[in-house]
Amino acid sequence: MRRAAVLVAVLVGLGGCGRANRSATDRPLRIWHWMTDREEAFTELAKRYTQQQGIPVRFELYAPSDLYIQKVRAAAQTNGLPDIFGVLGEMRDFASFIRAGHLLTLDAAMAKPVTPRGASWRSTFFPIALAMNTFDHHNPYGVPPGMYGVPLDVMNIQMFYNKRLLKELGLDPEHPPATWEEFLGVGALAKQHGVLGFVSGWAELWLIDCFATDYAIHVMGQKQVEATFKGKIPYTDPRWLEVLGVFEQLRASGLPAEGVVTMVNKRAEQLFANGRAVFAFNGTWGVNVYQGMNPDLDYGVMMPPPLRKDRTMVTWGGAGSSFMVNAKSPKQEAAVAFLQWLTAQPQQRFLLEATHNIPANELAAADLPPALAAFADDMHAVAHPRLFDVQERSTVIEAFDKGIQSILIGEESPLQVAQAVQDVKQREEARQTSLASSTARRP
Amino acid sequence: MALRKQSVVPYLFIIPALVLFSVFSVYSFSLLTYLSLFEWDGVSPIKQFVGLGNYWSVVMHDAVFWRSFWQAGTITAMALAFQNSLALILALTVNRRIRFGTFYRTLFFLPPILSEIVVGLIWAWIYDGNYGIFNECLKALGLGQFARSWLADPKTAITAVAVIHMWKGFGWGFVIFLAGLQTIPQELYEAATVDGANAWLRFRHITLPLLMPVGVVVSVLTILGTMQIFALIMATTQGGPAFHTEVPITRIMASLLGSSRLGYACAQGIVFGLILLAVSLLQMRLSRGMNRATA
């Protein structure tokens, strides 16, 4: 009896091994992502790919993004990453995955011709979208130079304005405020008419950071912002005070909605879509969101208004989302082939129509609907901290963005915030120096 | 032989529990402690040993972390005072065999079973500074001058969050207090009534002392539950405005996900855990002392 039980156990075990071996080759190509709004479109594309190529593909969704980040990190520690996945976070986090050997370099694949005319895969993308997935020879992270991600779409963050509300306020909806003063002036008008002036998800610090970065580059220029990140210019510099002063002026104008500092972006999107707010600072994805919430909403898109007319205004933008190939996956080649297919013109057009995001494939981005075309036209005027020579430390960014919230609630002045941020910056630099010296001391 | 077998069998029964406890508690805690000694982002192949450096930074330099303790402590103090008092009053009321007692029991236990995220989102709408019901009610009552964005105003943010937490949490205390009240023998009340004790004296000398152990349990659960408040904060304020509603768990999450400092987050977690342990032990000791004094 006991022998029979042992025999059964061994057979079951062997059966399991057999199944595991088969699953390594037969299992579908697994893709992890966090983009809840695109699940249906991705599932449809997976179905089409399976029909065309005979290779099963499975998209697995893990949202919200915080949960997704944790899942990817945990999987990285146990070598359990799927064949294709996205890395959320800063360039520093991206670099950690490369250093740990999780990401496949895509330079060779990108150089290969993919179109009937022999154009390389690389040449089909918006250059900025590729740049955000590329580490150059002098990158500060010590990562081997190369291209490590495939952009799926591009985005930038601008100012949406409600045309009907502008008209009600006595303004020309076809000529929205073009200067900072005109923009602030809408605050008083909005209050008189009982509507909200400006909404944005500024409880989510990254959206504040986008707005602040836009004005920092406008006031100082990108090189000076980078110099601050490198520790060469303090945050107490008058130019940074001017940047922080933008938020003091915003508060004084009464333009931001009550409670904008604890407003999540979903709530801001609802308020704008329901025609309760004149302006919303939001990204390209807003086109899809507003379409879903209120298809009749009549809105336009403009760059954040400049403080000075003689200086160019840029806005935060670049690759919206990107996919990376797991360097430890036995299905690397299949993964790359799938991504080539996914970023080809027909699939990118399908994604555009289904999700209203600007495709990363430049050819597919021609002939866009008007709202998206406004964003696409400004893709030449975008900046992204990922493309800076160096990134600011997250603790400093947090102190800066939380400081801006303090200004917006009238608790602190720009100078107080600047000093607090500079203190955090100095502490962080001292910590980094100490870590670097202890690493250097190690034999 | 039979005796030996008999003495082994009980140990066999506890092996599954022991294995689970070892894997999910002992091993996890050991790993957490080990990782807290490193500077590590959770992905890189290299972990840099920093000894007690992370603990030193947490204790000596992380003012926001300690501020978050103070804020969680404020919510806890409010919960201990108001949430538990409300729970006790309602339990005493329902225990008096009033009409619709079962209905009230169900009603009071509804908030705790709701998702914290859902509760947070609903209350965020109620508190909304632009179109919130709360402000509309104030205006209708002629108190419009007090209307504000309750969650975004630094003067009211922490109290507003505490109110939501207490609304959501009082049902637990209610159920436990009610169970405790039902274990007190009726004969004691009858004897006291015969002796001429009024309602207050019966409460003071019978209910309160006999309910003390239950009160300790409710207090400890309130402290542990409130100090670890997280989802509600994320659904309402995300720690804002500025740092006004940050609590220890949001700070640990900020280190883990925002700054990618896994080792530092582990050190924060251990410091937090030790403080909670100390507070709970202190609370139990104080309550035991009070219990003895009452007896």
Image (tube, coloured by chain):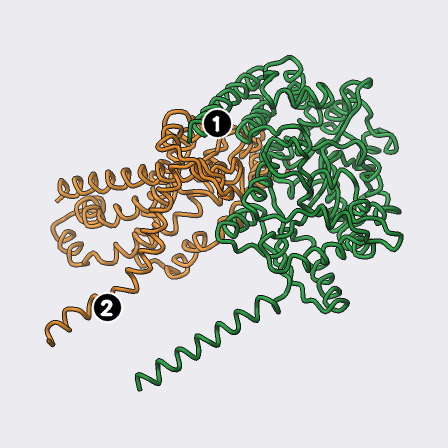
Chain colours: A green, B orange
Residue positioned most to the bottom: A1
Check disc 1 and report its element: helix, strand or loop: helix
- In the image, which is nearer the foreground, mark 1 or mark 2? 1
1 and 2 marks in contact (CB < 8 Å): no
In the rendered image, the vertical position of residue B284 relative to residue B51, given as above or below: below
Can you give x and y, in whole percent of width and height, for residue A259 in the image? 60, 32
Residue hosting label 1: A436
For mark 1, does the 10 Å Cα neighbourhood hold few (<14), some (14 to 19), or many (20 or more) residues? Answer: few
In which quadrant of the rendered image does the N terminus of chain B lie?
bottom left
Disc number placed over residue B12 in the picture, else none: 2
Host chain of mark 1: A
Coordinates of residue A424 in the picture (x, y in percent): 51, 22
Q: Extreme front residue here?
A: A443
The image quadrant where one finds the C terminus of chain B is top left
Say left or right for A311 vs A57: right
Give me the chain letter of mark 2.
B
The residue closer to the viewer here, A229 or A433, is A433
Q: Residue at x 54, y 69 (%)?
A: A21
In the image, A143 versus A50, the foreground residue is A143
Residue A68 at what x, y percent from top left? 56, 49
